[in-house]
Image (cartoon, rainbow, N blue to C red):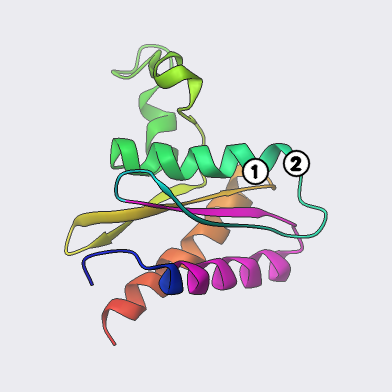
Amino acid sequence: MTKLSLSIAKRLLEEAEKKAEEIGVPMVIAIVDEGGNFVASHRMDDALLASIDISINKAWTSAALKMPTETLSNLSQSGGELFGIHTTNNGRIVLFGGGIPLKVNEQIVGAIGVSGGAVADDIEVAQAAVSLFHSLQHQ
């Protein structure tokens, strides 16, 4: 697999939603391609409206900077080497966890962004989809 197809993105959305239901938190899940371009999104019933843009921007941030947004959170603290990065890219960069790159052989093919719960919840839901993505590569 060298590209992230819509059919794979839909499976990742389903896996993330399943995890969100398991932990009891309505989420918005977004998938972008390697260039940060929108592929798919899903808003669960009762998920926060603000989470629509946040999830898409988490996915975009993760693809654009080639790192989990959780890592960026640590690097962008006062005194960190990326302090102030959130003021670039028209404020689109998200500095807290829930965005994770999707990689094939260390090459980024896309990213997932999840928003709606506490940051730990968002990361857990995103990671469920990333785990499925990794298992699909070995089929």
Is 124 positioned to the left or the right of 70 in the image?
right
Sort mark 2 into few (<14), some (14-19) or many (20+) by Cα contacts within 10 Å.
Answer: few
Residue holding disc 1: 52
Dot 1: what SS? Answer: helix
Q: Is residue 50 above or below residue 59?
A: above
Q: Residue furthest right?
A: 46
Residue at 70 percent across and 71 percent down: it is 22
Dot 2: what SS? Answer: loop
| Picture quarter with the N terminus | bottom left
Residue holding disc 2: 49
Does residue 110 show up magenta in the picture?
no
Q: Is residue 48 above or below residue 111?
A: above
Frontmost residue, 133 versus 39: 39
Place of residue 134 in the rendered image (x, y in percent of width and height, measured from the top left): 33, 72
Give the quadrant of residue 105: bottom left
- Separation of residues labelled 2 and 1 (CA atoms): 6 Å
Frontmost residue, 94 versus 4: 4
Frontmost residue, 77 versus 45: 45
Give the quadrant of residue 85: top left
Place of residue 114 in the rendered image (x, y in percent of width and height, measured from the top left): 57, 50
Q: Is residue 130 above or below residue 91?
A: below
Q: Amino acid at mark 2?
A: Leu
The part of the chain drawn in magenta is 9-33
